[in-house]
Image: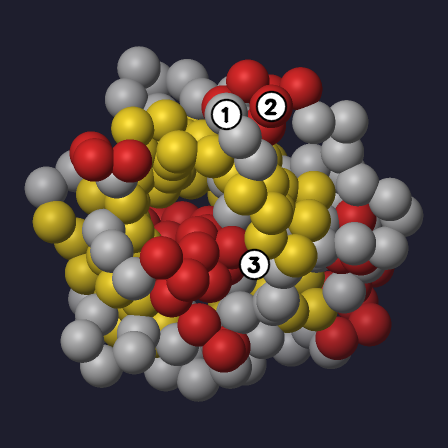
Amino acid sequence: MTKLHVLKVFVGEDGRGGNPLGVFLDAGAWDAEKRQRIATELGFSETVFVQDADRAEVRIHTPAVELPLAGHPLVGTSWLLRREGLDVPVLRPAAGEVPTWVDGDDTWISARPEWAPEFDMRQLPSPADVDAHPGAGPDEHLHVWSWEDESAGAVRVRVFPTRMGIAEDEATGAAAIRFGALVQRPVTIHQGVASRIVVQPGDDGTVAIGGQVEYVESREHFDA
């Protein structure tokens, strides 16, 4: 058996929301086929498989595909590795090196937008229109958004990455990275039920995203 750590990432200001994440800290011997099977069985929007904890080498799977980069898995894994006593200045997913740090209660990563999956980003007239959106078809990466308060940089978002095997994502860091590159200004995203993602575009073309993480539980997982 192997221990599965379950977290919530991008928890909202009121303690609600947060995207569930599964993390295996000792999965270096597992091949891609096994990782995908386990991620599909677990059903989290993403599951992280740490291949080398000291070097923070990780692989990320949705229920349907492996991703070279994803936001909430990297933020959550950075937080968890620090909780386990490891100094983590850089994460190493398949896409490349991703700097990570802590500022107050928020854990941050910074990455190049082109490393993230592309999304069909559609601005809607109001947050109410975002809330009322019916969702996406079976093979889309749909991101709908509206300003809650444009002057304050507050944004209402929902994301429907059905192509990844996810009907709706509670908090999507990769989409937040793409969105930061689109609007080129600091914003705070309120996504899903109650999740919060802080976004800060950099001068070098990267985009940083941050948020709060909570530990939910650990489970013994039969990995045969």
Name the mark nearer the viewer: 2 or 3.
2
Q: Residue at x 53, y 69 (%)?
A: 116
Name the mark nearer the viewer: 3 or 1.
1
* Nearest to the observer: residue 68 or residue 157: 157
Q: Position of residue 155 (x, y in %)?
A: 38, 35
Q: Which residue is mark 2?
A: 129
Q: In the rendered picture of this protein, how many numbered marks are placed on residues?
A: 3
Q: Which residue is mark 1?
A: 126
Q: Are marks 3 and 1 in contact (CB under 8 Å)?
A: no
Q: Which residue is mark 3?
A: 48
**Tag 1 secondary structure:** loop
Give whichever of discs 2 and 3 has the lower sequence position.
Answer: 3
Give whichever of discs 3 and 1 has the lower sequence position.
Answer: 3
Q: Is residue 44 left or right of residue 48?
A: right
Instruction: Name which residue type carries label 3.
Output: Val
Q: Residues within 10 Å of mark 2 (few under 14, many from 20)?
A: some
Residue 141 visible (yes or no): yes
Q: Residue 42 lies in what quarter of the image?
A: top right
Instruction: Name which residue type carries label 2.
Output: Asp
The quadrant of the image that shows the C terminus is: bottom right
Mark 2–mark 3 Cα distance, whole angstroms, equals 33 Å
Q: Is residue 115 left or right of residue 168?
A: left
Q: Are marks 2 and 1 in contact (CB under 8 Å)?
A: yes
Q: Residue at x 70, y 42 (%)?
A: 160
**Tag 3 secondary structure:** strand
Q: Residue at x 38, y 65 (%)?
A: 181
**Tag 2 secondary structure:** helix
